[in-house]
Structure formats: structure tokens, C-alpha cells
Image (cartoon, rainbow, N blue to C red):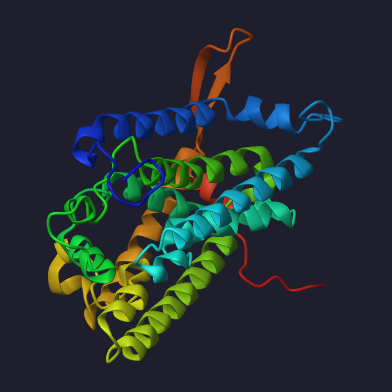
Amino acid sequence: MGFLHYRRNIVDFESSKGIFYIFFGIAIFIVLIMFIYRKKIHAYFNESQRRFIFNLLSLEELLMLIGFIALFFNFLRLFFLIFIDFPFKSELIPLHLCRFFTFLIPVLFIFRKGYKINLFSPIAIIGAVLGFLFVNLGVIPEVIADDIKYHDLVPGTKEYELAGYNVGYDGVMFWDFILAHSFVFIIPVFTHIIYGEKAKITTSVFLRGAMYLLTLLCIVVILNVILYFVTKNLDDKTKIEWNSNWFYLGSTGISTLGKFSMWPLSPLIFSIAGIFVYILLYILYITLTCVEFEINKYLMITKVRIKNIKQNFNSLKEPLFKVKK
């Protein structure tokens, strides 16, 4: 089908898994390096009078540029998928977790609010990691059937044989997935580092982030339900286009998890699981921020210090509602 298509070109996903996981490994390595050298990275980006890109941009202006570039490629992807008549039109609305963050993070940068990434960074990072681990770019029978039905593909044709995704390294969707999920994985960590104390996740930020995420989850469930009932009695083509499954909270859920990921259980189960994971991620954040590395002038680790976890947690305590005096 060519490089610029959502269907398979020549190489399938199974043959491309090695390359896919190499890039996942590179993303993990970048995050690990940033974590170890976070003090030096923070000092570099926050040095007084520091300018970037031919000495033209301040730090905030650099982040704004990153934001505009990221949004440009997001919209370019949308126009591309519309142009090639991508069947699943609901997928073009960025309400899947990682796609949502590929829009939200650039918007924060553009409005100079990058430090507010602390409200959702744990979920963004774990979402990106899970996206890599449970990638669905291979053979998906339901997607194949819908693609054939939507485009009225004729058996025996090349289009029919390549229906669905199953994209490899010679297809644009393969690289789109890697870049989007790497962005959502790496950029929150980088943003925390350069903003330092301003972006730390206090208990107040943790609770507000949980409330925002639960609100978003409720909105997404409602939108999924509305689209389901609106398209329920319409023609098959419209159903394929708009029967949404955002956050995997649509009527189809996650097929591999069976009835527990489908209505009416999915909103409750996903909410409980999400709260549990969110708490675990905050515990992990508290633990990781206790680890400090001493780096010499040759950029070698000379010492690792572990701060007291209880003291670290106490330093993050902050009332949810501050009373102005």
C-alpha cells in the first residue's frame, strides 16, 4: 500500500518487532540517563542568561517552539488520515490516553505552563510504557473486518489482502506510534527535571491530578455512551466511523480482557484500577526522588545517596486548599 498509508506496506508488524522494541529500549535509556544526570541537566537549562538555538530563545521560548512543532505534526497526522479515508473517524479525536497527552503537553508549553505537567505526568508516563508493552499494530480480526466492510473491499484484491493494520517499519503508522509514545514517555520526565521544585508532585498536586483524571474519565465514558446510542441504529459505515472506544471504555472494551473490560463493569473496574495504579505511581515517585547521584567532572557516578523516604514524603505534604491570610 506504500509508506503513506494506515495499512501494511510490505513488512508486517511481527517482522518489525525487533526494531520496535529497540526504540522502546532507547526511550528507556534516555529516561534513565536524564534521571541520573537530572541535577546537571537542570543546572544547564536554568543557567542565568542561557539562550538556545543560535542564542535566540529563552527556555520558555524553546518549550513554546517544541509545543508548536508537536501540535503541527499532530494536525498533520489528522489531515493525513482524513485524506486517505481512515475508517475509524472517532480515533481522529485525541481522546485515547497517549494521544490526549500529545496535544495537552504542547498546549502547556505554548501557554508557558509546562510545570503543570506534574498534575498528570505519572499517568502519562505509565500510559506510554503500557502502550509500548501492549501495542496493537499487528493482526486484529475486528479491525480487518471493519476495514473490509467500510471500504467494500473485494476478495482477491491487494487492498483486501492487506486490510487492517499489521504495519511494519516500512509504514508511516509504525513510526507515528513510536514517536507519539516516546514523546509522552520522555517529555514529562524532561519537563520535571528542567522545572525542578516548581514541578514537584506535592500531595496537593497528587490529589488535584487524581480529581482531574477522574473527571476526564467520566467525560470520556459519557461521550462513548452518547456516540454508541447515536450510531446504534445507523448504517454499518457510520457505526465503524463513530463507535468510539476512547480510554478503552467504549462498548467493545479490550477484547483480551473479556467481559470485565466491557459495559457496564468497565467504568467501575477501570476507575478502581486507575486509582490503585495512581497511588502506586506516587509511591514510586517519592521513592525515586530519594535517590541522588554525585557526578564528577568526567560525568562518572562517584556516589549514590538515598534520602529518608519518610522525610521526603513530609517535604511533599501540602494542604489541598490553601487559606490566604
Q: Residue furthest top?
A: 298
The quarter holding residue 276 reads bottom left
Does any portion of residue 169 appear in the rendered image? Answer: yes
Q: Position of residue 48 (x, y in %)?
A: 84, 30
Q: Residue at x 33, y 35 (%)?
A: 169
How many callouts does the rendering have?
0
Q: Is residue 161 left or right of residue 30?
A: left
Q: Is residue 255 left or right of residue 150?
A: left
In front of the other: 174 or 266: 174
Q: Is residue 276 left or right of residue 183?
A: left
In front of the other: 283 or 105: 105
In front of the other: 204 or 263: 263
The quarter holding residue 189 reads top right
In front of the other: 312 or 296: 296
Q: Position of residue 166 (x, y in %)?
A: 24, 47
The C terminus, quarter of image: bottom right
Q: Residue at x 51, y 31 (%)?
A: 35
Q: Residue at x 35, y 85 (%)?
A: 225
Does any portion of residue 118 appear in the rendered image? Answer: no
Q: Position of residue 88 (x, y in %)?
A: 35, 67
Q: Is residue 10 above or below residue 212?
A: above
Q: Is residue 180 above or below residue 296?
A: below
Q: Is residue 146 left or right of residue 25?
A: left
Q: Position of residue 131 (x, y in %)?
A: 34, 50
Q: Is residue 191 above or below residue 90?
A: above
The quarter holding residue 132 reads top left
Q: Residue at x 23, y 69 (%)?
A: 152
Q: Is residue 157 above or below residue 88?
A: above
